[in-house]
Image: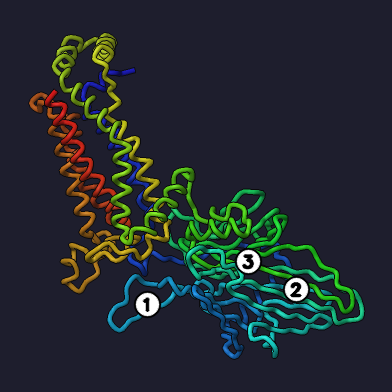
Amino acid sequence: MQFNNFNNNDNNRFIITFFILFIALFSIDYFIGQGRNTDTTQTIQKTETKIDNVQENTKSVLQNRNEGIKTAKVNYSYIKLQNASMRVKINLHGGLIESVKLKKYNEVAISQPGIYPQAVELLSQPQRPYYISIIYKGGSAIADDTSNWQRSPTDSNSLELRSDALTFKRTFLLDKNKVLKNTEDDYTITIIDKVTNTGNKPLSVSKSIGVFRKDPQIYNYAVVHEGAVINTEHTVKEIKYNKIKNGERLSNSQWFGFTDKYWLCAILNQTKNTAISMNSNATCYRLSTEDKQILLNPGDSSELVYTVFVGPKDINVLNQYAEKLNLDKFDRAIDFGWFFLITKPLTQFMGWLSSVIPNMGIVILLLTLLFRFLTYPLMKKSFVSIARMKTIQPRIAMLQKMYANDKLRLNQELVEIYRRERISPLSGCLPMFLQAPIFFCLYKVFFISISMRHAPLFGWVNDLSEPDMCYITNLFGLINWTPPGFLQIGIWPLIMGATMLVQQRITSTINKVDTTNETPEQKAQRKMMYFMPIFFTYVSISFPVSVILYWTISNIIGILQQQYVMKKINKV
């Protein structure tokens, strides 16, 4: 083991920095995705899948519905409902929940003169069909996505359908599960189906509720899951759209649906032993239940209740529904990632802070102060170690000359010096190793947290979840030109780069060594260290402003801590 590599603390930092640089170079596209503009970050993932065996009923439903979409069925009327948080539209053609708009969430952060922001629409028709449907089949009677329902003459919230020997009455209710504290919001829709056998012989009726989606829009980010999310066997399974296998089944599911970056559309089952069937046909996807059949004797009726959640992936909202409706791991609809034990509490803590502090920039400042306070002991130990290493540099240089041809003896002598002086050569790298996972966790939390969406900072920043759009390359908007992605360098990345440069210069001053006798390798390392602020400034242009703000504040606090610790060391 070559301990002589530890005689220069710059070598340690160079190795670590080079490793981070290597990882960053190959992970930029992985984490950030293709492009950064709002209209380019969303890409349509079209998966061409060969289906060998498609269940006849499901295939028929998908094909029939697609034909209906192609012919733009605009002659069918709707039932419209709304509460404090949603506007819901039910199509009589199929009895489908085909549009849900969230009244408290807009598509854009701010409105431009003459343009008013529209509410986020989760379920929609007809360009990218995304809807909730229920299918029944009993004998020759069928109620599916293509059935033509009629308005109930007695109830404005109900539909009626007669198919051979079966009659159906479907009622839609909002605000039946008002469980959220300190708000009138409710993001659930309750569907009550009454099925009656009007024939003269018993009928065995199959039933299935499902969510259908065609051509979903995909954000090209790898740090958040988009696709199917299914509670099964007391775990949560995430399946990307191109991984949905036709005919695959999962058992013991209590809830399932499709998830986007900030939104969730899920079926909430009444029992935990429900089986889920997945079906795909080209870019059409359907998740549906496989419930047991019900037996209806002549004249008998059965009332079936379904609950649908269509709303934001807010940790506080999901937790309250999970508690009141006894939903297993409903909070895991949020993609907390590998560091679940860290990112989930962080998300909850940040959500609590945002409820009492109106500006998310102040929330980020407080989080940064907290983590810098927690890591201060290690940072202090690091700089004390650096100072001690500096005091023994003359002895190390003498040993290097003395044992230039005896590496084994040199290593033994160096180990003895480190032991006698109680110095750990790697202690200077501890803060870097610790801050890397913290930075990743905060990046994840800032990225997935809906409290960051459209959260303003001040000045030109009106959305902390997006990159800085005030570019130096078009003179901060004075030139009417949108630069290409690689030239979209905002103000906040430049500020972050400047703080990083100052921090690097202070560190270089502390570790100042005689450059007259430096080797070509040491010279290359020193130049690489000067290059790092420029590199990370360019990498950060695609980061959300929230991440860059954390990084900048962390650098500033680090500089102040660095100066304070070194001042105390110099006094001693």
On residue 136, the disc is 2
- Label 2 amino acid? Tyr
Q: Nearer the viewer, mark 3 or mark 2?
A: 2
Q: Are marks 1 and 3 in contact (CB under 8 Å)?
A: no
Could you give the CA–CA distance between mark 1 and mark 3, rounded to whole angstroms?
31 Å
Mark 1 = which residue?
117
Asked whether the viewer can see residue 412, the reply is yes
Residue at far left of view: 516
Q: Are marks 2 and 1 in contact (CB under 8 Å)?
A: no
Q: Quadrant of residue 105?
A: bottom left
Q: Nearer the viewer, mark 1 or mark 3?
A: 1
SS category of the residue bearing label 2: strand
Could you give the CA–CA distance between mark 3 and mark 2, rounded to whole angstroms?
16 Å
* Quadrant of the drawing holding the N terminus: top left
Q: Residues within 10 Å of mark 1 (few under 14, many from 20)?
A: few
- Most foreground residue, 472 or 341: 341
Image point (63%, 66%), residue name: 286
- Most foreground residue, 499 or 245: 499
The mark nearer the N terminus, 2 or 1, is 1
Total count of labels: 3
- Label 1 amino acid? Pro
- Most foreground residue, 423 or 75: 423
SS category of the residue bearing label 3: strand
Q: Position of residue 200 (x, y in %)?
A: 92, 81
Q: Residues within 10 Å of mark 3 (few under 14, many from 20)?
A: many
Q: Quadrant of residue 392?
A: top left
Mark 3 = which residue?
286
Asked whether the viewer can see residue 30, the reply is no
Compared with 425, 551 (above or below) is: below
On residue 412, the disc is none
